[in-house]
Image (spheres, helix red, strand yellow):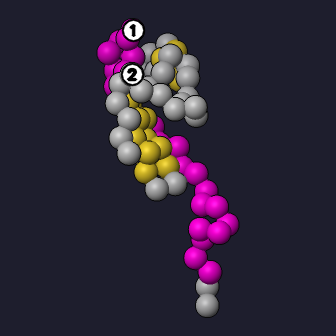
């Protein structure tokens, strides 16, 4: 599943500070969920800096492999 600009999820982060100038960015310009993670693309309107962040989630216990 790919989310593009203008789409949102209930768990979308908000007000992330720009990694370059520190100004708050209201929401990611793009996000893409993966297996146990979500990658976000942020674009600062103040300085035009773009960066990526990734949120990694732990697997549910029933999804973890059991050692034999």
Towards the viewer: 27 or 9: 9
Above or below 41: residue 25: above
Which quadrant of the rendered structure holds the N terminus?
Answer: top left
Which of the labelled discs sits on residue 46, or is there none?
1
Q: Quick one: label 1, few (<14), some, or many (20+) residues within 10 Å? A: few
Q: Is residue 40 visible?
A: yes
Query: In the figure, residue 7 lies in which quadrant?
Result: top left
Q: Is residue 60 magenta?
A: yes
Above or below 40: residue 1: below
Whole-percent x and y of residue 29? 38, 24
Residue, x 52% and y 43% (percent of image)?
55
Residue, x 58% and y 31% (percent of image)?
10
Residue, x 32% and y 15% (percent of image)?
48
Q: Is residue 29 visible?
A: no
Q: CA distance from mark 2 to mark 1?
A: 20 Å
Kind of element beneath mark 2: loop
Judging by the rendered image, the residue that carries numbered circle 2 is: 6
Read off the magenta span: 42-66
The residue lying furthest to the right in this view is: 61
Kind of element beneath mark 1: loop
Whole-percent x and y of residue 60? 64, 61
Which quadrant of the rendered structure holds the C terminus?
Answer: bottom right
Whole-percent x and y of residue 28? 44, 26
Whole-percent x and y of residue 45? 38, 11
Left or right position of 37 against 65: left
First along the sequence among labels 2 and 1: 2
Residue, x 39% and y 9% (percent of image)?
46
Above or below 43: residue 58: below
Question: Disc 2, disc 1: CB below 8 Å?
Answer: no
Q: Quick one: label 2, few (<14), some, or many (20+) residues within 10 Å? A: few
């Amino acid at each position: 599943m790919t989310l593009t600009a203008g789409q949102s999820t209930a768990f979308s982060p908000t007000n992330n500070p720009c990694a370059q100038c520190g100004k708050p960015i209201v929401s990611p310009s793009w996000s893409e969920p993966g297996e146990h993670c979500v990658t976000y693309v942020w674009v600062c309107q103040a300085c035009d800096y773009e960066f990526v962040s990734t949120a990694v989630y732990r697997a549910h216990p029933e999804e973890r492999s059991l050692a034999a």
